[in-house]
Amino acid sequence: MGAMAGLRFKQVDVFTAQPFLGNPVAVVIGAEGLDTAAMQRIACWTNLSETTFILKSSIADYRLRIFTPQHELPFAGHPTIGSAHAALESGFVPKKNRLVQECGAGLIELSVENDGRIFLRAPPAKTEVLNTAIPSIPLAAGGKVIKVDVGPVWVVGEMADARALAALKPDMTALAKWSNALKISGATVFAASGESASQIHVRSFAPAHGIPEDPVCGSGNISVAVFLKANGFLERFGKAYTARQGMQLGRDGRVSVRLNDKVEIGGHAVTCVEGTLAL
């Protein structure tokens, strides 16, 4: 495999314009020479929540494969935005305002805003109201729990306020066992920020997938938007709001959410590391 040495590699921080405050994704550019086993091995080694591989596509601007340290995902939010940033910055895709990404969940449309934020249109969600509590996570009184499948599968619930959300220390063993029993990625919980009418705070826990807490989770935020829409709560935060996430992990990611006929999420991305991958 010596001929493969020199694959371009970037580590991109997503949902922040300031390095080291968002959620990192490792991106391998032009990975046609790698098989699935090699991709999984690299993803296990980077040990980030996701590592992506940008490939040529005959039906889109590029094709993306997304891996956690343990398995491949059909879609994920922050890796999609970070990989689009890397594809444009590296010249793998010529500079343009609209992109189409091919991935396991189908074709994902992206747009690049004038301020540099990259938005994606979320794939259609499948939802189910669950008659269950989330282990060791006390939800707001009378709150519903909804399972949302957008590739990753999150169970979403609302907490009483941002202070309770910030103080939350879930039992990861119980949460992992519950997640495996329900065959889900984990739990995403949110609360009104108390700072602005159009801002919420979010936390996402996926210990069953080896990610006790995801710093800034794209699919989790899509799932919260779907939850708000399904419960008729759109007027509470508006059809365009900002989600803050990651403060408990020393980050401060900002996810812009737009709710029209489809859910769109977006944010800034910034490259923190670049070089070549030795194989």
Image: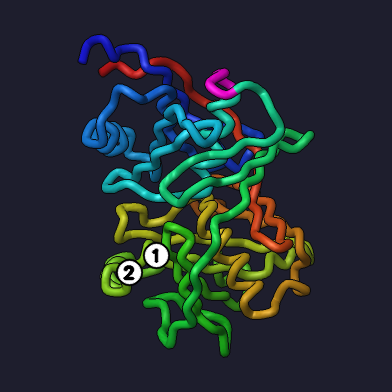
Q: Is residue 223 above or below residue 139?
A: above
Split into 4 quadrants, where in the image is the C terminus? top left
Please give the label number shown on residue 179: 2
Q: Secondary structure at mark 1?
A: strand
Measuring from the top left, give residue 220's x and y in whole percent.
51, 59
Disc 1 crowd rating (10 Å Cα; few below 14, some 14-19, many 20+) is many
- Position of residue 113 in the picture relative to residue 121 (left or right): right
Judging by the rendered image, the residue that carries numbered circle 1 is 186
**Position above or below: 120 against 258:** above
Q: Residue at x 27, y 68 (%)?
A: 180
Could you tell me residue 206's position as x and y percent?
38, 59
Q: Secondary structure at mark 2?
A: helix
Q: Nearest the camera: 87 or 241?
A: 87
Marks 1 and 2 close (CB-CB < 8 Å)? yes
- Quadrant in which residue 34 is drawn: top left
Which kind of residue does numbered mark 1 sit on?
Gly
Query: In the image, is residue 120 part of the stretch drawn in magenta?
Result: no
Prevalent SS, magenta region: loop
Gap between marks 1 and 2 measured at Cα:
6 Å
Q: Report x, y in % for residue 208.
A: 30, 61
Snapshot quadrant of residue 31: top left
| Bounds of the magenta segment | 89-93
- Image quadrant where residue 1 sits: top left
